[in-house]
Amino acid sequence: MAASTSPSRLPGVATTAYLSLAFLYIPILVVIFFSFNANSLITVWHGFTTDWYVKAYENEDLRRATWNSMIVAVGATFFSTVLALMAAMGMRGRLPRGLAGTSQMMMTLPLLIPEIVIAIATMSFFSIILRSEFMAGTAFLKLVDQYPLTQVLIAHTVFCVPFAYSPIRARIETLPPSLFEAAADLYATPWQSFRRVTLPLMMPGVTSGAMLAFITSLDDFIITQMVAPPGAMTLPVYIYSMVRKGITPEINAVSAILLVISILLVVSSYVINQRKAS
Amino acid sequence: MILKTMSSGLVIQTVSKTFPSPTGPVRAVDNVSLTIQPNEFFTLLGPSGCGKTTLLRMIAGLDIPTSGSILLDNQDIAPLPAYQRPVNTVFQSYALFPHMTVTDNIAFGMKMQGKPKTEIDKAVKEALALVRLDDKGERMPAQLSGGQQQRVALARALVNHPKILLLDESLSALDYKLRKEMQIELKRLQRETGITFIFVTHDQDEALSMSDRIAVMEKGNVAQIGTPQEIYDRPATRFVADFIGICNFVKASSLGLNDNCDIGFRPEDASFTVGRGMGKGNIRHINYRGAVTHYIIELEGGETITLSEDDPQNVEVNDAVSLVIPPERLIRCTA
């Protein structure tokens, strides 16, 4: 057999690859493993139990935080996906080539900005509005008083837009403009054309965009921590506050649930895209 | 008895279209006026960039004229958006909706107009039969061949009984044999439906074989309008003569004529003789092409021309010959 000349056969390459995988996934597996530990010490195995899941379920604060997270994630997903879809449609084919590239870059650039910077910017923005003496400030203050999640929802919607935008934009690029011209030619008003042609054809991009937005919102900690008023605690923020009191397998159980939700969403997004692509 | 409403066809009046571009505005269609009769098979013919597709898109409502008016049965349709015009288009790429079945694609236009379901079902069935795809209604467009997709696109437009059917280079994506079949098919559909067809193409063969009349376009202008025979036999400009069929151009003096313009003639209109003729030259090449034989002749002035003869002649390369061209076949071009 001839010796392989491929660089991927260099000694150590395969080992490193396997080690990387191990480092990525072993800690997560350990968290899940100890969520079934019948002992409040999280590092010593004592026997199998599902008590921690029951305990997590019975924890009222935890349930409220989960509920808050869901409201924010669903709301932010909806609004950011709608905004991203409108942005992608609005920018398509309207701008000259150079500007189109710039606009697209501007839409996705926030993905590269450190989250802490966005968090501080968002926090300052809200405090300026809340302190302003204009009508908007007092109206906003009232809204925030009544619905403590308002600021979290707005902040999440904003930072989810670039995540929702990328797959939507990628999808819209694949659709020839003649499809929309054909719809108009066949008596479809712009609204009918959107309902019957644009939206169905955009659906794979919209679903993956929405799922990315949902995951991003559900997982967010830094920005939420900065902008959330008391009573607007989301799940990651609550987990963090639990950790400060000491780690118990209850946290492992909650983390495992969060992980499962995330994995389910990512996998279904992937499956949907694969099916539409074929 | 209700008489069909008198239609006066499509009148395009001094229509221009200017597009912005980095190097300044480009005039794609320049002050074009023409009239298309009802039930006519009318072709816009020209090389790419001559403005034929832009003109078609303005009739469809997909581009808005910079100036001028487009009258359909005496009504100016230029201000109407595409979805309010009684005009349908067969796109170059077909533009079938990939997420709908063939039936849903064909029904789309009538659904958008809010026609009753029973009427739509009946019309779709008829349209499928018209393009001979009766058994393909439940297929998705991606499951059809190029020729079948083309026919779905035709059915999708024809089912709405438009006053005008626009065809944008609709046959260019098909292979040669299929294209010939579709040419005959299109003629049949036009006769059977009685709809005005406006066909855009750069293929002169297609234009000559299908059209009632042709408008040859050049650089945003109409160079000539006429029946295929008028355009072939009496081209108005050198561009038209050159674009439609093959045409030799030589100086008038090379043919012994007293004129200072160029003279054109078709390869099949001229013949040669070893005796006396219009211009002298030598045979340089003989290309046997089966049905015809091409003779490449170099005239004494140095110009090279091509003649075609149905039967091989008894001559050899380098033989001296003279041209014989009936005077009425000479094309005197102004430009």
Image (tube, rainbow, N blue to C red):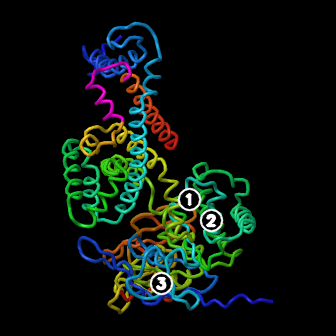
The quarter in which the C terminus of chain B is drawn is bottom left
How far apart are the alpha carbons under marks 3 and 1? 26 Å
For the residues beneath circles 2 and 1, the answer to whether they share a chain is yes
Residue A228: percent from left, percent from top? 29, 44
Q: Quadrant of residue B312?
A: bottom right
Amino acid type of disc 1? Answer: Leu
Q: Quadrant of residue A263?
A: top left
Secondary structure category for the residue under label 1: loop
Tag 1 residue: B96
For the residues beneath circles 3 and 2, the answer to whether they share a chain is yes
Q: Of callouts 3 and 2, which one flags the residue occurring earlier in the amino acid sequence? A: 3
On screen, A75 above or below A94? above
Amino acid type of disc 3? Answer: Ala
Secondary structure category for the residue under label 3: loop
Magenta segment's dominant SS is: helix
Magenta part of the chain: A235-250
Q: Are marks 2 and 1 in contact (CB under 8 Å)?
A: yes
- Residue B156: give its label: 2
- Residue B78: give its label: 3
Q: Are marks 3 and 1 in contact (CB under 8 Å)?
A: no
- Residue at 74 percent across and 69 percent down: it is B119
